[in-house]
Image (cartoon, helix red, strand yellow):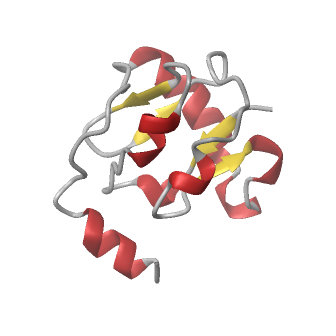
């Protein structure tokens, strides 16, 4: 069961998750990260590293975030791989605070 990035990552792009991933399954656009379900090895290392609690095992994705399973599958393969920790977006801390984290 692959892991999924959900809407909490939007406008954040914290890359703590990427730095612990043993494979190159993270991809990104200008707003967030996505996980390629075909590349994810289901290790779960990324989930506890996400400072905005945006990553879930696909069977644990909250009901209101289910559409992100397909969004990750559709978007990730067509975006550049993100394999190194980088700076979050300038909006990341504000988003984290708005989530109460």
Along the line of sight, the residue nearer the viewer: 51 or 99: 51
Q: What residue is shown at x 66% (from left), y 16% (from top)?
A: 38
Along the line of sight, the residue nearer the viewer: 17 or 92: 17
Along the line of sight, the residue nearer the viewer: 30 or 57: 57
As drawn, 54 above or below 58: below
Along the line of sight, the residue nearer the viewer: 82 or 61: 82
Q: Is residue 62 left or right of residue 77?
A: right
Q: Is residue 44 left or right of residue 27?
A: right
- Quadrant of the rendered structure where residue 29 is? top left
Q: What residue is shown at x 41% (from left), y 47% (from top)?
A: 16
As drawn, 82 above or below 89: above
Residue 53: x and y in percent read 55, 62
Residue 9: x and y in percent read 43, 54
How many discs appear? 0
Q: What residue is shown at x 32% (from left), y 30% (from top)?
A: 84
Residue 37: x and y in percent read 65, 24
As drawn, 100 above or below 77: below
Residue 10: x and y in percent read 39, 54
Q: What residue is shown at x 42% (from left), y 39% (from top)?
A: 33
As drawn, 11 above or below 19: below
- Quarter in which the N terminus is drawn: top right
């Amino acid at each position: 069961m692959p892991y999924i990035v959900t809407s909490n990552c939007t406008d954040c792009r914290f890359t703590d998750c990427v730095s612990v991933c043993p494979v190159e399954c993270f991809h990104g656009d200008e707003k967030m990260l996505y996980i390629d379900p075909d590349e994810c090895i289901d290790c779960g290392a990324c989930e506890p590293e996400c400072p905005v609690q945006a990553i879930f095992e696909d069977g644990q994705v909250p009901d209101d975030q289910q559409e992100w399973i397909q969004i990750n599958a559709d978007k990730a393969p067509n975006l550049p791989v993100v394999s190194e920790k980088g700076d979050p977006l300038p909006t990341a801390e504000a988003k984290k605070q708005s989530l109460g984290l």
